[in-house]
Amino acid sequence: MAFQHETVLPKPQNVTRHVDKVGVLICGLLLYAALVPPFVSFRANRIVQGEGRFLLDSMPTSVGYGLIGIIILAAAVALLVANTKVRLATAFAALVALAVAVGLSASSLIPPENTYARVSAASGFWLLLAGLVVLATDAIARLDPKPLTRLILLAVSLLLLSAFLLSGLWKDLSIMKEYQSRSDIFWTEAQRHLQLALGSVFAAMLAGIPLGVLCFKVERIRAAMLNSLNIIQTIPSIALFGLLIAPLGWIGTHVPGASQIGIRGIGAAPAFVALFLYSLLPIVSNTVVGLAGVSPAVRDAARGIGMTGRQSLFKVEFPLALPIILTGIRIVMVQNIGLATIAALIGGGGFGVFVFQGIGQTAMDLVLLGTIPTVILGFAAAILLDALIDSKLLSRGKAT
């Protein structure tokens, strides 16, 4: 009996390339930004309406086509490449190319020896920047780097930004001309902004952490304290600044020595107090939550080895609650860096001086001169505190 051998053909494999879902959005945004909206805006002087210039019309042809090629490559990587390191490297390279291109665009559009013409980044540039930043942050989130790696990435980014600022490549951009005419005031206001933001957070830590411990230990005052702080949090910032003008003005006038230490109705004092009050709720509530999250077995073990209540609090419970407390401080830090801009409305100084001057003069580059440093400070503070929260130092505390 003859047997027939059937030839079994291998099943065709699915060779469809995986398309990244986030990459679809990034790819569409990058391609749209490179081809449709104007890349920069050209104005004959600071006051007149700007004229949009598209990417290829705003810079030397070779630079324009080179940038478009890099953007198309970044869009393809975002759409098709799953390797996170490749995505991150591509995003950084494209960001550097974008920074170089916008500087060359300003230099090529402004006529020689013309001190009145202005070139500003238009919607195309900002959309490209947004798409590349999303690509970079998405890659970093997928990599989930260690705290030290995050700090290195932050340092590299700040060093690159400083290199561009010091190189003079951006000197013809309108925002840099606004800075050049206000360079001495800029650093004075930067110092005031940091003093308001960081000083109010430090004061809130000194008051908020003990209040949180008290609320945790004495339950009957917990609800009243947290509800009172919640009410403060619901008051709009401008309204709170205004409400503090009258009482602080009275204190500065009638209390001996108050005006000498800076307490008055307008200026930094009401802004500082308002930021301090806004900072209390996250710190107090996170302190309560952190201490409540400590296992009762840990407290029993501390008492079992002869620790007093105070020793258990400072040596066992507080170190275990510290990551959650630092999370509250992180929220407050970023919040206060942003809210400190409003202090300029009541004479408190800070980067808000440029923001509100720019709004009053309809000068968007002056608004950006105050906005961009505020955003950079907020991002840097968030990354630094996130790295501290996830560091091995606090991990040891969790493990114990």
Image (spheres, rainbow, N blue to C red):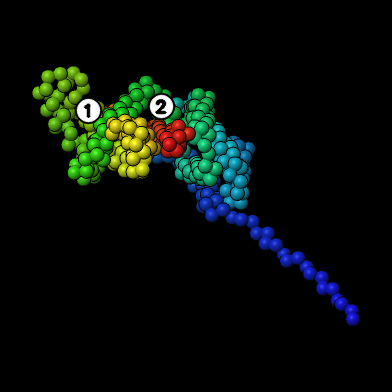
C-alpha distance separating marks 1 and 2: 27 Å
> How far across and down, in percent of the image, does residue 36 sit?
52, 49
Look at 86% across and 76% down and name the residue there. 4
Q: Which residue is mark 1?
A: 269
Which residue is painted at 32% across and 36% down in the image? 303
Q: Quadrant of the C terminus?
A: top left
Q: Nearer the viewer, residue 125 or 172?
A: 125
- Cβ atoms under marks 1 and 2 closer than 8 Å: no
Q: Horizontal placement of 237 versus 15: left or right?
A: left
10 Å crowding of disc 1: few (<14), some (14-19), many (20+): many
| Amino acid at circle 2 | Tyr
Q: Which residue sits at x=11%, y=28%?
A: 250
Label 1: element kind: helix
**Any mark on residue 179, and which?**
2
Q: Quadrant of residue 336?
A: top left
Q: Does 185 sit left or right of 230 as displayed?
A: right
- Residue at the far right in the pictured view: 1
Residue 278 x, y percent position in the rendering: 26, 37
Tell me the SS state at disc 2. Answer: helix
Q: Disc 1 marks which amino acid?
A: Ala
On the rendered image, what quadrant is the N terminus found in? Answer: bottom right
Query: Which sits earlier in the primary sequence, circle 1 or circle 2?
Result: 2
Closer to the camera, 125 or 164? Answer: 164
Where in the figure is residue 327, as x and y percent of width and height?
Answer: 37, 39
Quadrant in which residue 189 is drawn: top left
Q: Is 124 or 155 nearer to us in this picture?
A: 155
Residue 2: tell me if it is visible. Answer: yes
Q: Residue at x 27, y 36 (%)?
A: 213
On screen, residue 18 above or below 188: below
